[in-house]
Image: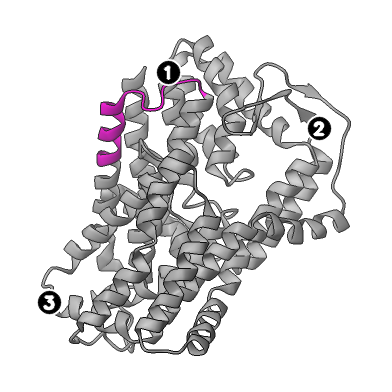
Amino acid sequence: MVLFAARIRDALKLELPHPFILLLGGVAIAAALTWILPAGAYQRRADPATGRNVVVAGTYARIDPAPVGPMAALLAVPRGIVSGADVILTVLFVGGAFALLDATGALARLVGALVGRTNHPRFIVVLICVAFATLGALENMQEEIIALVPVLLVLSRGLGFGPITAVAMSVGAAAVGSTFGPTNPFQTGIALRFAEMPALSQPALRFTLLVAALVVWIVWTVAMTSRDQVLPGIKPVEARRATARDGVLLAMVLLPFIPYVYGVLRYDWGFNELSALFLVAGVAVGLVAGRSLSETAAGLLKGMESVLAAALFVGVARAISVVLSDGQILDTILYSLATPLARLPGLAAAMLMVPTHALLHVPVPSVSGQAVLTMPVMAPLCDLLGISRDAGVIAYQTGAGLMDMITPTNGAVLAVLLAADVPYGRWIRFAVPGALLVSIVGVVGIAFAR
């Protein structure tokens, strides 16, 4: 199976433009579609628990067209950046804290110490995959990874591998954990809610899918490390002796994730709380490292500069959704994809929900936004087809969740690739076969959920 996926990988020889051009091209395509596709809308009702407007199934109707012109499309870019301000600030604050930690030399010494003590580099890759998958399953970790790229690159190089491995064991593993994590409030949790299902429906099946999917992704990642060796001429990471203060500094910059995960699960925290926690952590790292307040502030700001472009990608990506919403064609796209499924046999329709959700995730790159948009339509459709709503939710998870690591409209993924200096085409050649292998786990889950 892995060999077959490797052949698919080799067949995907894509040379694509810079991620910024990809995103701007996505905005232009979205604007063009508003002139081609008919405008339409579902009726919506307010959900008091989440404050979201939820689609009412069976209410789609054509409305007056609202095509988006060139000027409106251009204005959508700053509007998208404004709407993504909370995420952008999180990337800046987290990036500033880790950059300041890196400037102290603590990261280099800690990674050097780890590399110098291991004789099993692939085992370290497995551990990192498990760690990021756990964070994905708990709080849908994605944007936060942008700031961790320099650390991951140093670690991957120290283990003898290249940047693809660094991205795979972070972004890839986190996406798999987010996709199948039964406790992920931003994906599984919200999908179950809007499918009117219990908060943890069929827990045994869901936890089994999570473990199986992660095992498949780890096997794929480890199998491909032999093709991702460190390029000749790159200086190897030297084994170093880390100090106790280095460990304290690392603990301080990782500490915010603990109250944040708890806050997400218990108090509905978001990116603003995480930004505040990392602002405190960044200042604390500078002071403990022996810097003055002014030196700490300068170090934080300098660190933010290194992730500024990547942070802006998140906002530019949101401009695509802004254009589609302004043009009133998002509901049309959903209706066009969902309606043909009603004419198919139950199991076939359930299986085809996976690529349907994957396609829909291109114009709707937010997994939570897609759940709110689609599940009120797909859940009643499951009833009509004679399949369980659990199967419909798993189809959404598999299609939208795994597509999250691939779609060119995901600004966070493009930002990570930019920071890791990995061309989008090269990542596609690696990630698509791996995601297809993992999707088999989701398909099996759909069959068992019927």
At x 51%, y 80%, the residue is: 300
Asked which secondary structure carries label 2, the reply is: loop
Disc 2 marks a residue whose amino acid type is: Pro
CA gap between label 3 and label 2 equals 61 Å
Front of the two marks 1 and 3: 3
**Residue underneath mark 1:** 347
Disc 3 marks a residue whose amino acid type is: Arg
State the mark number for residue 38.
2
Characterize the local packing of mark 1: few (<14), some (14-19) or many (20 or more) Cα atoms within 10 angstroms.
some
CA gap between label 1 and label 3 equals 51 Å
Percent from the top left, x then y, of residue 428? 46, 57
Characterize the local packing of mark 3: few (<14), some (14-19) or many (20 or more) Cα atoms within 10 angstroms.
few
Q: Which residues are magenta?
A: 195-212
**Residue underneath mark 3:** 117
Foreground: 359 or 1?
359
Foreground: 52 or 149?
52
Percent from the top left, x then y, of residue 84? 64, 56
Front of the two marks 3 and 2: 3
Quarter occupied by the N terminus: top left
